[in-house]
Image: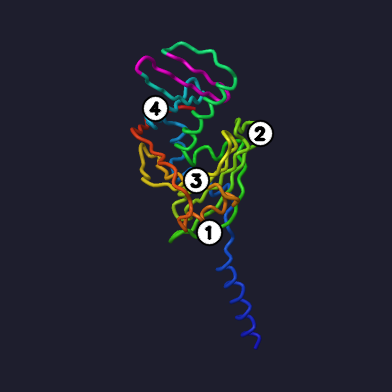
Amino acid sequence: MRRILILFIASLVFGCGGKNKPLPDAQSVVDKSIEAAGGDLYRTSEISFTFRDRDYRAYRESGTRLLMRITETDTARIEDLLSGSSFERRIDGVPQILADSTRMSLAESVNSVHYFAYLPQGLNDAAVNKTYLGLEKMGDSEYHKIQVTFDQEGGGTDFEDVFVYWFNAETYYPDYLAYEYNTNGGGKRFREAYNERRVGGIRFADYRNFKYTGPLHISELDSLFLKDKLEFLSLIELQNITVTPGSYN
């Protein structure tokens, strides 16, 4: 009788352990995702690409990371250069004097394109706060759902934006993301990654961009996506990607 009782208790313990395995924390998921997508190559490489007929470049100069956007017109070459909180516009090499509101708007637009291009890189920045929301199934795959918010200090002018990422539990790639923003009237978006490829050892993806205007929190938009209830908005496609290895700090 005692042997039967021990076996019964053991079966309960191991049975529960199998069904209720401890879930990872948000930080470990993001760490694995960054490593799987390219790791230190993000930091040590110069990256350039074209997005909607504009050229973008991320590189380091004297140890400082610079984000550039180049616009070629029939009459001028416009360079927008973002370094931390510092922004400069040059037209044909001549620095321009800009109103504060214009400078902030241009800096946001340059940073936004670079931010999405290098995901999940950037999710370990000092101003980023990560919260694990759970393990969910979408289609045939399971996903770690993580919410990201930002501190006001170091979080940029759009620090109030909220993001949710769905990290594939096998590959750790962020196959889906949603975000709510407040600039330009605000809104909610959901993105599905496709055309994943590696260039110079770094994973890049294009996105199908969807719009949502209802009351649901962005963490629930996956359910609407699976039911085809989101409004298709645009394609986010990167072209002419080049990755040049370097030894930057």
Viewer-nearest of discs 4 and 2: 4
Packing grade of label 3 (10 A; few <14, some 14-19, many >=20) is some
Packing grade of label 2 (10 A; few <14, some 14-19, many >=20) is few
- As measured in the structure, the alpha-carbon distance from the residue carrying label 4 to the one carrying label 2 is 30 Å
Point out the image quarter for the N terminus.
bottom right
Q: Nearer the viewer, residue 174 or 14?
A: 174
Viewer-nearest of discs 4 and 1: 4
**Which element carries disc 2, helix, strand or loop?**
loop
Task: Answer whether residue 69 is visible to the viewer in this image.
Answer: yes
Q: Earlier in the sequence, mark 4 or mark 1?
A: 4
Q: Name the residue beneath numbered marker 4.
A: 54
- As measured in the structure, the alpha-carbon distance from the residue carrying label 4 to the one carrying label 1 is 37 Å
Determine if the magenta segment contains residue 111.
Answer: no
Q: Which residues are magenta?
A: 74-91
Q: Name the residue beneath numbered marker 3.
A: 211
The x and y percentages for residue 138 are: 47, 58
- As measured in the structure, the alpha-carbon distance from the residue carrying label 3 to the one carrying label 2 is 26 Å
Task: Answer whether residue 203 is visible to the viewer in this image.
Answer: no
On screen, 238 above or below 11? Answer: above
Q: Name the residue beneath numbered marker 2.
A: 152
156 on left or right of 112: right
Q: Nearer the viewer, residue 140 or 212?
A: 212
**Which element carries disc 3, helix, strand or loop?**
strand
Q: Name the residue beneath numbered marker 1.
A: 136
Viewer-nearest of discs 3 and 1: 3
Q: Earlier in the sequence, mark 3 or mark 1?
A: 1
